[in-house]
Image (cartoon, coloured by chain):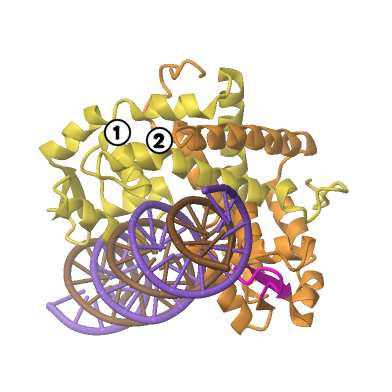
Chain colours: A orange, B yellow, C brown, D purple
Amino acid sequence: MTDGKLPDGFRLRPESMLCFDLYATHHAVGQIYQPLLSELGLTYPQYLVMVVLWEQDGQTVGELGARLDLASSTLTPLIKRLESQGMLERKRDDKDERKVRVKLTAAGQALEDRSGHVPGCVAQAFGLSLEDFVKLHEMLGKLRTSLKAKTGAEEA
Amino acid sequence: MTDGKLPDGFRLRPESMLCFDLYATHHAVGQIYQPLLSELGLTYPQYLVMVVLWEQDGQTVGELGARLDLASSTLTPLIKRLESQGMLERKRDDKDERKVRVKLTAAGQALEDRSGHVPGCVAQAFGLSLEDFVKLHEMLGKLRTSLKAKTGAEEA
DNA sequence: TGCGATTTAATCGTACGCGATATATATGAC
DNA sequence: GTCATATATATCGCGTACGATTAAATCGCA
């Protein structure tokens, strides 16, 4: 693969293209999350933001974006929707007024417990062995590292 | 994983969540495709539709949707944009007027050659060994099968 | 100190993506 | 043949997503 060549039979058949795999799998995962999250009043991207905040509260919009690979043009409206739902508050940083810090409300913190079953349900739907789970996690991480190096390469 | 339990340390850390992996990797792949496809005047989803049509021309909207896991609410406007760009034509099926058949124009067919470098460029950016490539393809396929069985399960 | 360059969010326009709904066509029971 | 049902696509409203731009705050450095 490092020579930029694909083996015969993999070329252009959508089912054999990794981009298609990721596209379709990402889709299918969304379908699994959707009913679980709608009970909590969250969309899938909103859930990811909450997960990141549950891990560390009070992050800036930029820090959330770095974690989730999202631009402010996506995050700002998304966060405002979560704010209007009472899950969090937006407040300018005291030291640096350019930054907006996102802090969970009590309701936002409480949602972590109410969502405790979600990872287990999803993991069960995955139906992967622990070995495959870890292997997949590793390979996707490696893939992302390679892709991001490539994305940034032309800018240097 | 089949017992719905995650090993300690994987719980809720976004970097360890497979949904996050897929989300972020899907993202990163989009970033790789974007500059390549913008030269061709295509978005990433539009490219996927074209790939499916290059494989077999004249499919119905429903068949395209089945391949790409997309509803008509997504496909209809997307296909209309491709039509207005002169890449394809939409025509009601003679036998069944409910169906819309999508046929490539000469320009749409010609685009296949102009896009010939894309899969190789992307594969190179992936930076995976052939072994990892095939393994990842297999695991994502297995994962999708499991997820789709789960998605349809409640409906039965 | 002053002022241009950089950083950080927000805004805008376009394009997905989906659930719910609408509309037109086809099918089947009788 | 008629009407209920099913199927195929289209439409609508909402919520992402992103590139380009804007505006405000901060920083760097002469």
Determine whether the residue tagged by mark 2 lies in a helix, strand or loop: helix
Residue at 15 percent across and 55 percent down: it is B84
Residue designated by label 2: A14
Residue designated by label 1: B55
What chain letter is assigned to the residue under label 1?
B
Q: Position of residue A128 (x, y in %)?
A: 72, 41
Which of the image's four quarters has the C terminus of chain B? Answer: bottom right
Residue at 73 percent across and 39 percent down: it is A133
Asked whether A9 or A69 is in front, the reply is A69
Q: Amino acid at mark 2?
A: Pro
Q: Is residue B135 above or below residue B29?
A: above
Point out the stretch of residues depicted in magenta: A92-103
Q: Amino acid at mark 1?
A: Glu
Mark identifier at residue B131: none
Count of all numbered marks drawn on residues in the image:
2
Q: Position of residue A147 (x, y in %)?
A: 54, 35
Residue A102 in the magenta stretch? The answer is yes
Q: Is residue B116 visible?
A: yes
